[in-house]
Amino acid sequence: MNIRSTVLLALAALLLWLAGCHYAAKNVYTSKSFKTVARHHKTIAILPFDVRVGLRPNEMRNLTPERHYDLELKHGRAVQSALQVYFLHTVNAKKEVIAVQDVRTTNALLEEKDIQPEELTQFTPTELAQLLGVDAVLMGSLTTEKPLSTGAALAIAAYTFFFTPDITDGGPTNAGNTTMKIYDGATGDLLWSYDKMLARGLGSDTQTIVRAITRKASKKIPYGKLKA
Protein backbone atom coordinates (compact mmCIF):
# COMPACT_ATOMS: atom_id res chain seq x y z
CA MET A 1 0.00 0.00 0.00
CA ASN A 2 1.49 3.37 -1.05
CA ILE A 3 1.41 6.54 1.03
CA ARG A 4 -1.55 7.98 -0.91
CA SER A 5 -3.67 4.88 -0.28
CA THR A 6 -2.66 4.83 3.37
CA VAL A 7 -3.63 8.45 3.83
CA LEU A 8 -7.00 7.97 2.11
CA LEU A 9 -7.72 4.95 4.28
CA ALA A 10 -6.65 6.91 7.34
CA LEU A 11 -8.98 9.77 6.47
CA ALA A 12 -11.91 7.40 5.95
CA ALA A 13 -11.25 5.64 9.24
CA LEU A 14 -10.81 8.93 11.05
CA LEU A 15 -14.11 10.31 9.76
CA LEU A 16 -15.93 7.17 10.85
CA TRP A 17 -14.36 7.37 14.28
CA LEU A 18 -15.14 11.06 14.68
CA ALA A 19 -18.75 10.41 13.71
CA GLY A 20 -19.04 8.09 16.67
CA CYS A 21 -17.32 10.43 19.14
CA HIS A 22 -19.49 13.54 18.96
CA TYR A 23 -20.86 12.69 22.39
CA ALA A 24 -17.48 12.62 24.13
CA ALA A 25 -18.19 15.67 26.30
CA LYS A 26 -18.14 15.40 30.06
CA ASN A 27 -21.33 16.18 31.93
CA VAL A 28 -21.21 16.91 35.66
CA TYR A 29 -24.17 17.96 37.80
CA THR A 30 -24.07 18.96 41.46
CA SER A 31 -27.26 19.85 43.29
CA LYS A 32 -27.37 23.29 44.88
CA SER A 33 -28.37 21.57 48.10
CA PHE A 34 -25.46 19.12 48.05
CA LYS A 35 -23.36 20.82 50.74
CA THR A 36 -26.34 21.27 53.07
CA VAL A 37 -27.59 17.71 52.67
CA ALA A 38 -24.20 15.99 52.52
CA ARG A 39 -23.08 17.44 55.85
CA HIS A 40 -25.70 15.24 57.52
CA HIS A 41 -24.44 12.08 55.80
CA LYS A 42 -22.56 9.77 58.13
CA THR A 43 -22.19 6.73 55.87
CA ILE A 44 -22.27 6.17 52.12
CA ALA A 45 -22.50 2.85 50.29
CA ILE A 46 -20.78 2.36 46.95
CA LEU A 47 -22.78 -0.11 44.92
CA PRO A 48 -21.27 -2.55 42.40
CA PHE A 49 -21.28 -1.02 38.94
CA ASP A 50 -23.34 -2.41 36.10
CA VAL A 51 -20.63 -3.11 33.52
CA ARG A 52 -20.95 -3.97 29.84
CA VAL A 53 -17.71 -5.07 28.18
CA GLY A 54 -17.45 -4.84 24.39
CA LEU A 55 -15.31 -7.55 22.82
CA ARG A 56 -14.18 -8.44 19.32
CA PRO A 57 -15.95 -11.41 17.63
CA ASN A 58 -12.92 -13.68 18.08
CA GLU A 59 -12.84 -12.82 21.78
CA MET A 60 -16.55 -13.53 22.13
CA ARG A 61 -16.08 -16.96 20.57
CA ASN A 62 -13.70 -17.88 23.37
CA LEU A 63 -16.14 -16.86 26.09
CA THR A 64 -19.35 -18.52 27.14
CA PRO A 65 -22.19 -16.15 28.13
CA GLU A 66 -21.59 -17.17 31.73
CA ARG A 67 -17.88 -16.30 31.58
CA HIS A 68 -18.64 -13.01 29.84
CA TYR A 69 -21.11 -12.10 32.58
CA ASP A 70 -18.56 -13.10 35.23
CA LEU A 71 -15.99 -10.85 33.54
CA GLU A 72 -18.40 -7.92 33.64
CA LEU A 73 -19.28 -8.65 37.26
CA LYS A 74 -15.59 -8.65 38.23
CA HIS A 75 -15.03 -5.31 36.47
CA GLY A 76 -18.06 -3.88 38.28
CA ARG A 77 -16.62 -4.97 41.62
CA ALA A 78 -13.21 -3.56 40.60
CA VAL A 79 -14.69 -0.09 40.02
CA GLN A 80 -16.58 -0.35 43.31
CA SER A 81 -13.41 -1.24 45.23
CA ALA A 82 -11.38 1.47 43.50
CA LEU A 83 -13.89 4.12 44.55
CA GLN A 84 -13.82 2.87 48.14
CA VAL A 85 -10.04 3.31 48.16
CA TYR A 86 -10.49 6.84 46.76
CA PHE A 87 -12.80 7.78 49.62
CA LEU A 88 -10.48 6.31 52.24
CA HIS A 89 -7.26 7.83 50.95
CA THR A 90 -8.48 11.10 49.42
CA VAL A 91 -11.78 12.30 50.87
CA ASN A 92 -10.94 11.04 54.37
CA ALA A 93 -7.19 11.57 54.14
CA LYS A 94 -6.94 14.11 57.01
CA LYS A 95 -10.19 13.53 58.85
CA GLU A 96 -13.20 11.33 58.18
CA VAL A 97 -15.65 13.41 56.16
CA ILE A 98 -18.00 10.49 55.57
CA ALA A 99 -17.69 6.83 56.49
CA VAL A 100 -17.73 4.35 53.63
CA GLN A 101 -19.49 1.05 54.10
CA ASP A 102 -17.06 -1.74 53.29
CA VAL A 103 -17.90 -3.07 49.83
CA ARG A 104 -17.89 -6.63 51.16
CA THR A 105 -20.71 -5.70 53.54
CA THR A 106 -22.58 -3.90 50.76
CA ASN A 107 -22.32 -6.87 48.41
CA ALA A 108 -23.24 -9.38 51.11
CA LEU A 109 -26.42 -7.45 51.93
CA LEU A 110 -27.34 -7.26 48.24
CA GLU A 111 -26.66 -10.97 47.76
CA GLU A 112 -28.95 -11.79 50.69
CA LYS A 113 -31.77 -10.19 48.66
CA ASP A 114 -30.47 -11.76 45.41
CA ILE A 115 -30.01 -8.31 43.84
CA GLN A 116 -27.59 -8.28 40.88
CA PRO A 117 -25.79 -5.11 39.68
CA GLU A 118 -27.95 -4.85 36.56
CA GLU A 119 -31.07 -4.98 38.76
CA LEU A 120 -30.18 -2.07 41.06
CA THR A 121 -32.08 0.44 38.94
CA GLN A 122 -35.27 -1.47 39.72
CA PHE A 123 -35.07 -0.15 43.27
CA THR A 124 -35.34 3.43 44.44
CA PRO A 125 -32.29 5.04 46.08
CA THR A 126 -34.29 5.26 49.31
CA GLU A 127 -35.03 1.52 49.23
CA LEU A 128 -31.37 0.72 48.64
CA ALA A 129 -30.21 3.06 51.41
CA GLN A 130 -32.64 1.50 53.87
CA LEU A 131 -31.59 -2.00 52.88
CA LEU A 132 -27.92 -1.13 53.37
CA GLY A 133 -28.43 1.06 56.44
CA VAL A 134 -26.66 4.12 54.99
CA ASP A 135 -27.37 7.81 54.44
CA ALA A 136 -26.38 7.97 50.77
CA VAL A 137 -25.67 5.65 47.88
CA LEU A 138 -23.29 5.94 44.95
CA MET A 139 -24.25 3.88 41.95
CA GLY A 140 -23.23 3.80 38.33
CA SER A 141 -22.58 1.98 35.10
CA LEU A 142 -19.61 1.44 32.83
CA THR A 143 -19.63 0.48 29.17
CA THR A 144 -16.54 -0.31 27.13
CA GLU A 145 -16.95 -0.36 23.39
CA LYS A 146 -15.60 -3.03 21.11
CA PRO A 147 -12.01 -2.13 20.13
CA LEU A 148 -11.41 -1.08 16.53
CA SER A 149 -10.05 -3.64 14.11
CA THR A 150 -6.30 -3.69 13.66
CA GLY A 151 -6.62 -2.19 10.18
CA ALA A 152 -8.70 0.74 11.30
CA ALA A 153 -6.46 1.36 14.30
CA LEU A 154 -3.36 1.37 12.10
CA ALA A 155 -5.08 3.70 9.63
CA ILE A 156 -5.75 6.22 12.39
CA ALA A 157 -2.18 5.77 13.55
CA ALA A 158 -1.02 6.57 10.01
CA TYR A 159 -3.15 9.72 9.95
CA THR A 160 -1.65 10.74 13.29
CA PHE A 161 1.85 10.18 11.94
CA PHE A 162 1.35 12.15 8.71
CA PHE A 163 -0.90 15.00 9.85
CA THR A 164 -0.42 15.40 13.62
CA PRO A 165 3.22 14.43 14.28
CA ASP A 166 3.19 16.20 17.67
CA ILE A 167 0.67 13.68 18.98
CA THR A 168 2.41 10.51 20.10
CA ASP A 169 -0.71 8.47 20.89
CA GLY A 170 -1.45 6.00 18.10
CA GLY A 171 -5.14 6.87 18.02
CA PRO A 172 -8.13 5.61 19.97
CA THR A 173 -8.89 1.92 19.58
CA ASN A 174 -11.25 1.50 22.52
CA ALA A 175 -13.53 3.77 24.48
CA GLY A 176 -15.39 3.69 27.72
CA ASN A 177 -18.37 5.54 29.08
CA THR A 178 -19.17 5.84 32.75
CA THR A 179 -22.11 7.26 34.60
CA MET A 180 -22.01 7.84 38.37
CA LYS A 181 -24.75 9.18 40.60
CA ILE A 182 -24.98 9.99 44.30
CA TYR A 183 -28.42 9.97 45.91
CA ASP A 184 -29.59 11.12 49.30
CA GLY A 185 -30.89 8.07 51.12
CA ALA A 186 -33.63 9.85 53.05
CA THR A 187 -35.30 11.65 50.14
CA GLY A 188 -33.98 9.78 47.12
CA ASP A 189 -32.92 13.09 45.59
CA LEU A 190 -30.12 13.15 43.05
CA LEU A 191 -27.24 15.10 44.59
CA TRP A 192 -24.49 14.56 42.01
CA SER A 193 -24.03 12.92 38.64
CA TYR A 194 -21.09 12.42 36.33
CA ASP A 195 -21.17 11.22 32.74
CA LYS A 196 -17.99 10.91 30.75
CA MET A 197 -16.65 9.16 27.69
CA LEU A 198 -12.95 8.38 27.56
CA ALA A 199 -11.04 7.21 24.48
CA ARG A 200 -7.83 5.27 24.93
CA GLY A 201 -4.85 4.71 22.67
CA LEU A 202 -3.60 1.95 20.43
CA GLY A 203 -3.33 -1.33 22.30
CA SER A 204 -5.46 -0.32 25.28
CA ASP A 205 -7.54 -2.96 27.01
CA THR A 206 -10.65 -3.02 29.15
CA GLN A 207 -8.73 -2.93 32.43
CA THR A 208 -6.96 0.23 31.26
CA ILE A 209 -10.33 1.79 30.50
CA VAL A 210 -11.65 0.85 33.96
CA ARG A 211 -8.64 2.32 35.74
CA ALA A 212 -8.58 5.52 33.69
CA ILE A 213 -12.29 6.25 34.00
CA THR A 214 -12.34 5.50 37.72
CA ARG A 215 -9.37 7.78 38.31
CA LYS A 216 -10.83 10.69 36.34
CA ALA A 217 -14.36 10.39 37.74
CA SER A 218 -13.34 9.97 41.37
CA LYS A 219 -11.59 13.36 41.33
CA LYS A 220 -14.96 15.02 40.65
CA ILE A 221 -16.84 13.52 43.61
CA PRO A 222 -17.81 16.59 45.66
CA TYR A 223 -17.44 15.08 49.14
CA GLY A 224 -13.76 15.95 48.92
CA LYS A 225 -14.71 19.65 48.82
CA LEU A 226 -16.55 19.52 52.13
CA LYS A 227 -14.56 20.89 55.04
CA ALA A 228 -13.88 18.13 57.54
Image (cartoon, rainbow, N blue to C red):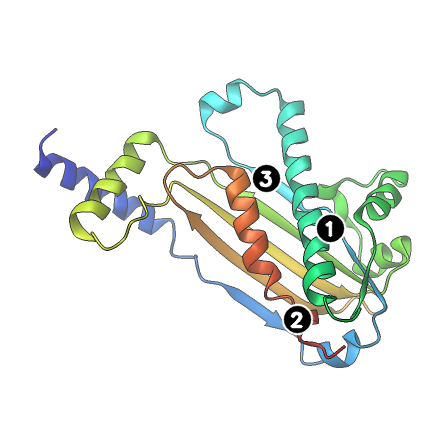
Give the side of residue 187 with respect to residue 191, left or right. Answer: right
| Residue at position x 88%, y 54% in the image | 132
The amino acid type, in three-letter code, at marker 2 is: Pro
Q: Position of residue 43 (x, y in %)?
A: 84, 63
**1 or 2: mark nearer the eye:** 2
| Residue at position x 49%, y 23% in the image | 59
Mark 1 to mark 3: distance in Å?
15 Å
In the image, 62 versus 188, the foreground residue is 62
Residue at the spot of label 1: 121
Mark 2 to mark 3: distance in Å?
26 Å
Residue at the spot of label 3: 52
Residue at the spot of label 2: 222
- At numbered mark 2, what does the secondary structure look like: helix, strand or loop? helix
Q: Position of residue 45 (x, y in %)?
A: 80, 56
Crowding at dot 2, Cα within 10 Å, few <14 / some 14-19 / many 20+, comes out as some
The amino acid type, in three-letter code, at marker 1 is: Thr
The mark that comes first in sequence, 1 or 3, is 3
**2 or 3: mark nearer the eye:** 2
Give residue 202's quadrant in the image.
top left
Q: Position of residue 65 (x, y in %)?
A: 63, 23
Give the side of residue 183 with respect to residue 79, left or right. Answer: right
Mark 1 to mark 2: distance in Å?
23 Å
